[in-house]
Amino acid sequence: MSSKKNKTMNRSQRYEMDLPEVVDMDVLSYATDSEIRGRQDHLEQDRTHALHVGQDPTPWEVELAYVQREVDIRRKRSAAHERFVRSNPEAAASNDYNDESNLDSLPN
């Protein structure tokens, strides 16, 4: 997640603020949960600061939307996994679903 040094001036031209780093969605998909939470917190703080200094918050809102999308994907994936484990206790007990060589024998 390299930082870009794009800068924009607020309406009064008194404060200069870095634009948020644009992160590819593929990079977000490999980030840890704590990295995602940290990015979300950082973007929310910067968005608030942008509003405070009179800057357009849209760039931060766009990045927040991508981060929130990744959070939602992970939440849905976790819920689907929990449903699978509850409906397949024998597979969950044996951990067969963690072994890719056994995937063909598991129910869909």
Image (cartoon, rainbow, N blue to C red):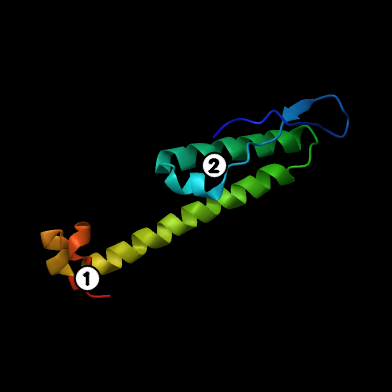
Label located before the other in sequence (2 or 1): 2
Q: Which disc number belongs to residue 40?
A: 2
Q: Residue furthest bottom?
A: 108
Percent of width and height locating residue 31? 44, 42
Crowding near the residue tagged with mark 2, few <14, some 14–19, many ≥20 C-alpha atoms within 10 Å: many
Where does residue 85 sit, x and y in percent of width and height?
23, 65
Camera-side residue of 84 and 97: 97
Vertical relation: 22 (above or below) 88: above
Q: In the orientation shown, which residue stands out farthest toward the front?
A: 101
**What's the residue at 53%, 38% (across, down)?**
39
Q: Nearer the viewer, mark 2 or mark 1?
A: 1
The outermost residue toward the right is 12
The circle on residue 55 is none
Quarter of the figure that contains the C terminus: bottom left
Quarter of the view holding residue 5: top right
In depth, the one of 25 and 18 nearer the eye is: 25
Q: Quadrant of the N terminus?
A: top right
- Residue type (three-letter) at the residue carrying disc 2: Gln
Q: Is residue 87 left or right of residue 17?
A: left
Question: Relative to residue 91, is residue 49 depicted above or below?
Answer: above
Picture residue at 68% right of the left edge, 37% below the top: 48
Instruction: Name the kind of residue labelled 1 in the image.
Output: Asp
Q: Position of residue 16 (x, y in %)?
A: 78, 26
Say which element carries label 1. Answer: helix
Q: Nearer the viewer, residue 19 or 41?
A: 19
Q: Residue at x 60, y 39 (%)?
A: 43
In the rendered image, which residue does mark 1 sit on? Answer: 104
